[in-house]
Image (tube, rainbow, N blue to C red):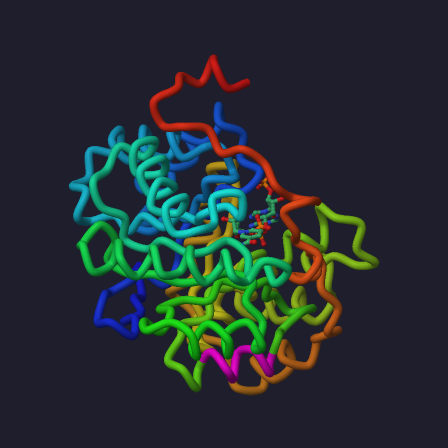
Amino acid sequence: MTETRIVLNNGVDMPAIGLGVYQTPPEATTDAVTEALRVGYRLIDTAAAYLNEREVGIGIRDSGLDRSEIFIETKVWISDYGYDATLHAFDKSAGKLGVDQLDLLILHQALPSRFDLTLDAYRALERLLADGKVRAIGVSNFMPEHLDRLLNETSVVPAVNQIELHPYFQERALQKVNTQHAIVTQAWSPIGGITSYRDAPKSTFDDPALLDIAQQHGKSAAQVMLRWHLQEGRSVIPKSTKPTRIAENFDVFDFELTSEELATIDGLDTEVRGGPEPDAITLEAFGKEIPEAGRTAAANP
Ligand code: NAP
């Protein structure tokens, strides 16, 4: 298997596929991470809000791989937005992960209702980048209007915009804006997990067109979706806690979708989001305290 890599707009090299760990319970996280690294993944995507950064760090150390071989990405939660608070959020995340430097640190949400805090948080990321504490910075769930404002009021163009993106929600206009600014689109819920674990009308895993293409290639619907992203130039971070699926989701380098097959998948877009509207993420509704790095897990049930 040959892993593909993506060069970010600041020259940093990022693996195209990573393991996501949203909803991975802390007690299952270390095993998922070590298994992923064992089968070839070199990117792990976590977040302060997932409350499993510590276990990601243990998995990375347990893998026996050199730190330089692994790309660690994490996210600052909205409750830690603001210049000083976000600098401190870096210390919390790096402390839990047990590393001095992060490969990619991103703002988890745009927080449009307090964009002043978002801008200060991003300025803190710029500081961390200048100080060499992070190798790249980016954003998540930013819509074109949020990117416009950020680009007008800050200096460093984000390297990555991590957004909900799967065959049923393709965000074509936003992808175009990302590309115009040389921002890599990183797909969250890349295999449409959100269409099965949330109450969506239909799940991507059961989609007849995807299953048909999968059958043609002797692959699964998940592998077809991942291949579709990679061939269209996106980064992907599928999540699983199951070793067989972790391996399956990485086994996507030995087949190629035709342009007709890519077009068929492009045609599955329903333009209906599975996750919350980015504007609905407010401090009042979604604020939560992110524990300090120094506290033990037992002190933070
Ligand atoms: P996903 O990766 O598209 O799908 C994960 C779901 O599909 C899980 O329920 C998983 O269950 C199942 N699954 C995994 N591989 C499978 C396979 N080969 N066949 C059938 N089912 C499979 O969705 P996601 O977890 O929502 O997104 C992936 C990552 O994106 C997250 O872990 C997180 O890192 C990131 N994310 C970011 C945001 C954001 O706001 N920035 C939001 C959501 C997610 P099992 O674990 O039981 O296998």
Q: Outermost residue toward the right?
A: 201
Residue 214's image quarter?
Answer: bottom right
Q: Outermost residue toward the top?
A: 298
Magenta stretch encompasses residue 243: no
Q: Residue at x 54, y 33 (%)?
A: 289
Give the quarter of the figure containing the C terminus: top right
**Side of 149 relative to 33 (left or right):** right
Asked whether residue 112 appears in the rendered view, the answer is yes
Vertical placement of residue 34 versus 140, above or below: above
Vertical placement of residue 224 versus 80, above or below: below
Residue 205's image quarter?
Answer: bottom right
Give the quarter of the figure containing the N terminus: bottom left
Q: Residue at x 70, y 61 (%)?
A: 277
**Side of 122 relative to 278 (left or right):** left
Q: Residue at x 20, y 60 (%)?
A: 130
Q: Residue at x 58, y 72 (%)?
A: 143
Magenta stretch encompasses residue 174: yes
What secondary structure characterizes most of the magenta part?
helix
Q: Position of residue 245 (x, y in %)?
A: 51, 44
**Side of 49 relative to 193 (left or right):** left
Asked whether residue 218 appears in the rendered view, the answer is no
Q: Closer to the camera, 81 or 11?
A: 81
Residue 35's image quarter?
Answer: top left
Q: Position of residue 87 (x, y in %)?
A: 33, 46
Vertical placement of residue 177 versus 70, above or below: below
For the magenta stretch, what is the residue range?
172-178
Q: Position of residue 181 (x, y in %)?
A: 40, 82
Q: Position of residue 149 (x, y in %)?
A: 50, 75
Q: Closer to the camera, 54 or 89?
A: 89
Q: Give the tally of numbered discs.
A: 0
